[in-house]
Image (tube, rainbow, N blue to C red):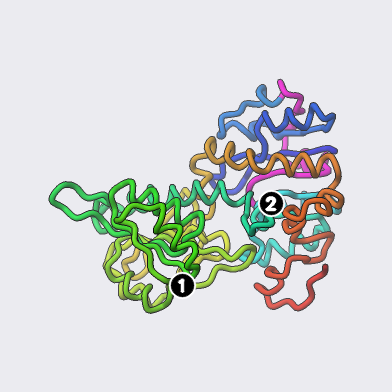
Amino acid sequence: MIVGVPKEIKNNESRVGMTPAGVLELTKRNHTVYVQTTAGIASGFSDDDYQQVGAQILPSIDAVYAESDMIVKVKEPIPEEYNLIKEDQVVFTYFHFAADQELTEAMIDSKSVCIAYETVQDANGKLPLLTPMSEVAGRMSIQQGAKYLEKPVKGKGLLLGGVPGVSPGKVLVLGAGVVGIQAAKMAAGLGAHVTILDINMDRLRYVNDIMPSHVVTEFSNEYNIRKHIKTHDLIIGGVLIPGAKAPKLITRDMLKEMDSGTVIVDVAVDQGGCIETTKATTHENPIYIIEDVVHYCVANMPGAVPHTSTVALTNVTLPYVISLAEKGWEMACKENTALFKGLNIIKGKVVYQPIAEAFGWEEVHS
């Protein structure tokens, strides 16, 4: 198979879909790999690194798409890429279709095969290709939240961990999944007081078992959310329904109940966000303020630490890339039920139910 690795062109996206280590695994199996020039530079991998393991370097993104049977990348295609995607071409990346109808319709029109990292799901219900980026984003959410609590960027002027004689800040985490647990771990490590909410009691029991005593758990409902937003300084949105839009747990009217300078970091922004006032931002312009509440809603948070993120992501995507290259998408998905669940759009037809539900479409093809 001919595998293409284009350079990411989304705003401030510095990750790359494959490392030289991954390329070597494909080339030694006699597959051809085309890498766009400088695609890996920001992640710490030069063109020469790729060439030494057998990749061929192409000068433009157009050439990579034109020559490849399968595209392996990180973020969803943006409008400049829509017309580059060919009929029957396999595109293996994060898509988050339920939050973007324009992208969904463009991929339907392309008649390509869209396999989404975020809906690949194993027999235990885990999302192996989403987990490493959720780990990065969960940890980063506290770093960024702590920074935007500073007064020069309109925060409360509060040091999250406090100092002797001064109380630490309070962090409210919505969701006890991968993002929530990583956020709670980082916040607790700084010395902050952490409250984590979820509707899954098994997850709350797990958090209670592994976290220190200054991380407390409560059942998630509107009453408890309204109670805690009045007293917490940093709110992390880490709610996920695989492949579907995130539920809106904090509404616009709730912002008026928060203290001026409260910071919200909505990690669920890729799936539409779990805060009603969420709108996707970039690393270039990461925040906006509504009702004196600072919103940090960067849609590709892990892109700010591309070396860590690229290596963490490609560690888990590579086995699936090899399977797709060796067997073709149909056989690979037939033999691997986790990968099968990654199929979102096949040659003009939506095959993943939550996407249709997000847009009120009735027809889903099996």
Residue 77 included in the magenta stretch of the image: no
Question: Is any atom of residue 244 visible in this view?
Answer: yes
Q: Under tag 1, what secondary structure? A: loop
Q: Is residue 21 left or right of residue 232?
A: right
Q: Under tag 2, what secondary structure? A: helix
On residue 80, which mark appears? Answer: 2
In this rendering, the label closer to the viewer, 2 or 1: 1
Residue 54 included in the magenta stretch of the image: yes
Please state which of residues 294 and 141 is positioned toward the viewer in this rendering: 141
Amino acid found under the numbered disc labelled 2? Glu
Around disc 2, counting alpha carbons within 10 Å, would you say few (fewer than 14), some (14 to 19), or many (20 or more)? few
Task: Pick whichever of labels 2 and 1 is earlier in the sequence.
Answer: 2
Q: Residue at x 76, y 33 (%)?
A: 34
Q: Is residue 34 left or right of residue 207?
A: right
Give the answer, above or below, for where 36 lies relative to 346.
above
> Which stretch did the figure color magenta?
51-75
Count up the numbered dots. Answer: 2
Q: Quadrant of the C terminus?
A: bottom right
Q: Is residue 37 left or right of residue 296?
A: right
Residue that mark 1 sits on? 249
| Residue 51, position as x, y percentages in the image | 72, 23
Q: Quadrant of the N terminus?
A: top right
| Residue 253, position as x, y percentages in the image | 38, 78
Around disc 1, counting alpha carbons within 10 Å, would you say few (fewer than 14), some (14 to 19), or many (20 or more)? some
Please state which of residues 337 and 23 is positioned toward the viewer in this rendering: 337
